[in-house]
Image: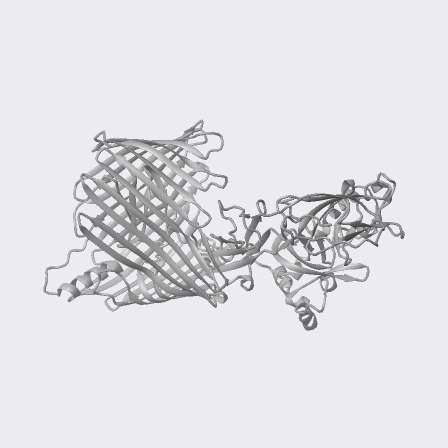
Amino acid sequence: MAGIVYMKKSVGRDILYSFLAVFLTTSAAPTFAETSYDFDESFVKNLSGVKVDVTRYAQGNPIDPGVYTLDIYLNGRLVSRENVRVIRDGNSNKACLSYNLIKSLAIKDSVFDAKQITNLRSESQCIALEEVVEDSHAAINSADMQMDISIPQIYLFRTARGYVSPEYWDHGENAFSLNYNTNYYRSVYSAKEYNSFYGRALAGFNVGGWMFRHDGALSWRRQQGTEYHHYDDINTYVQRDIPQIKSRLLLGEGNTSGEIFDTLSFRGAQISTVDQMLPDSQRGYAPEIRGIARTNAQVSVTQNGNKIYETTVSPGAFNISDLYPTGYGGDLDVTIKEADGSESHFSVPYASMARLKRPGMTYYTLTGGQSRRDNMVYTPSIYQGTIQHGFTNSLTGYSGILGSDSYTSLLLGGAFGLPFGAISVDVTGAQTEYADSKKQGVSYRATYSKKVSSTDTNFTLAAYRFSSSGYYSFNDALQINNYYKKYGSETTKAYLSRPKQRFSLTASQNLGDSFGNVYLTGFVQNYWNSTGTNTQFQVGYNNTIGRVAYTFSANRLLYSTGGHDTQFSIDFSVPLGSDSKNYLTGSAAHSKEGVTAQTAVNGVLGDYDQYNYNVSAARDAENNKSGSVSGQYRSPYSTLTASYTQGSNYYSASGGASGTVVALPDSLTFSAYQATTYAIITAPDASGAHVIGYPNIVLDGNGRAIVPNLMPYRINELAIDPKGIPLDVELEATQQRVIPIEGAVVKVDYKTSKGQPLLIRANQLDGNPLPFGAAVNDENGNLVATVSQGGQIYTRLNKDISQLHISWGKKPTDNCLVNLESGNVRSSNNNTLARIETTCSDDKSRESRYVSNESSNNDIKG
């Protein structure tokens, strides 16, 4: 029975009710909550002619008193999951409202008086929905574990679609977390040995809603006897959400968003709007990095002089899509260090889209502190404030101020939603002081975004910027003041290459299902202090023929110094097998150095896609051959990687590990995944169960697992697949919902019960099966099951039980006893089902015991 989820008290009963409903003969006027039915008992007559009392189904599918975790549907829409208490009220059962349930339904406060509000908070009182809200109805569907509620709209608050009230946000547990990423790289080429290690850790401690974070990276390398090591303090800060104003407070080291001004690093305080807290319907980026490696190569990414990412990639095309967000401004500089010691560099534009906001929405940020930048002797105090407000559907205004003791900048702009696209235009004025000079200037910027649906043309971003000769950005002002502070005003004038004009474009054109897609990216930029222009662009075409996907691309770089570089490449990919998990890939590139080519077989393996592999062969422009192999294993506790490359005069090897460790006051749990917001699932005795939707996340020996990548401020579904857990363990529920704040570690407890599962086939004294639909009660009178077809009973007994009482009618003779110690018993253990074949009788004299799970093999003992 593993993998089957049900309510123990409704086993067989829902089937019976569905069966009875088919033969409905008469009915009262239908209502949402209660409908009276009359059933013809002859339709459920057993082979022996025994009739079953079905009057308890006259008011719908009955549910026994107790507390149930139910999905709450309001007017056909899922709104929450709540614990609902059911009590016996006269001859029927009643579902009780609770204060949490009222809040999740968003019923207006005016509907309830003060006494009712008090009663809603008390478990000693029970108020039904129909008693307080006119024309409302509520019904529990035990088969689907949900409560269907109907309430007239006039009694409900109007909320935005996707809205989750802050009072339901889970701030999580007091917890320590550690995200780690390590990589060791060794290469030997031309008798030269190079070794390096990179480790980055994001450590966090959550307590009382405050979140302490430290993000740091350790770099070490050794080459030809020279050793270098350095630790980068990327960010150290503490933050806290302020739900009342949809904002977040940050104290310590951080970066501004870069959405209005360019990103800058600071040490101080910041408070800003968090759009994630807003509903989905009211919400207004790190880019992907693509490239090609010839060998088993080391890829490093820096922004504003700070290394923010480093990893090892296999030969061939690669795509880095897991950068930590670092703001909206500042190009990413990418370095590919090949196993033979050669290096290549390119830049990835990093800019925002047009800044349209919804009408009435306001976004702000206030930052104050000290400038923070490596290798600077000049770190002035800084302040920055920005604001964006949506005036209409087609107009958003934005403004900002940025300054320090030697720099002041004011920005004013607007974004317009026009029929021919979204445009933002702004002007920035700046005054810069350095040495004995004072410079003033302006910078104009325009961005454009448009998707032409009729032609399926997409201009992701087109941007133009012009700066006058006296305009300095804040980073320019920092550098030139740092120069004069360091060397003095009598030195030769500092050289600073300041941009004059810059135009960038990203566009794509879909040519139809059979003709593929064309894309174009690039930028052109010149400078005030130097002649020449930097130009970089890429044009490409991709399509699919049958199962073969291919891409042609051309890259052109023109340097301001007069040099240039052009590269043409082709890539293809062919799935191997029908499951599309394994591929044959290849690529070739032509540049001024010659032609390079490589081919590889790669894919994923394992029942849970926990293994990745890549085997490749390549040749470079000088016709040197090389081969490499790499693999990744995502274990339940960590992700392990390894690779090896062999060439004609070099070889390289690397290995690494990444993952997460989370410590709660009572547990220590490991994961192969990294994220910022987690859930810790606990399900005692359910070791081996898998978390659905996450490859190879398995509950450990203590019944715990880390679930990563939760969506902050949103409802997250967490489901467990019970397949693989011992048969004597049962999950009372396999799915729950959580609504965490960003950075939280929430604990989700799944209740389990242990006991021997039994499948009983008990005949009556005359040899006929027990009547279908008969009620099964234990010695204490608790309903534990319903007799299903063929007179079979499935139940799980958690306590020592010796007998079960079966009843199917109102006559004194319409009942019997099943002695669990009698009959034929098939041996069982934790992974099999105990089966009993016996006779149901009225013999009450025999004393016997049933031992549920104390014995070593969990058998039925006589």
Residue shown at 15% from the left, 56% from the top? 495
- Quadrant of the rendering where the N terminus is positioned: top right
Q: Is residue 28 left or right of residue 571?
A: right
User: Viewer-proximal residue, 67 or 82?
Assistant: 67
The x and y percentages for residue 81 are 61, 56
User: Viewer-proximal residue, 107 or 4?
Assistant: 4
The x and y percentages for residue 655 are 33, 45
The x and y percentages for residue 181 are 36, 51
Q: Is residue 466 above or below residue 611?
A: below
Quarter holding residue 154: bottom right
Residue shown at 43% from the left, 42% from the top? 451
Residue farthest toward the top in the current orientation of the protein = 546
> How are the residues colored?
one colour
The x and y percentages for residue 485 are 17, 65
User: Viewer-proximal residue, 306 or 9?
Assistant: 9
Q: Is residue 248 left or right of residue 64?
A: left
Q: Is residue 349 above or below residue 171?
A: above
Quarter holding residue 189: top left
Q: Is residue 410 above or below residue 673?
A: below
- Is residue 315 visible in the rendered structure shown here? yes
Q: Is residue 334 left or right of residue 805?
A: left
Residue farthest toward the front in the current orientation of the protein = 862
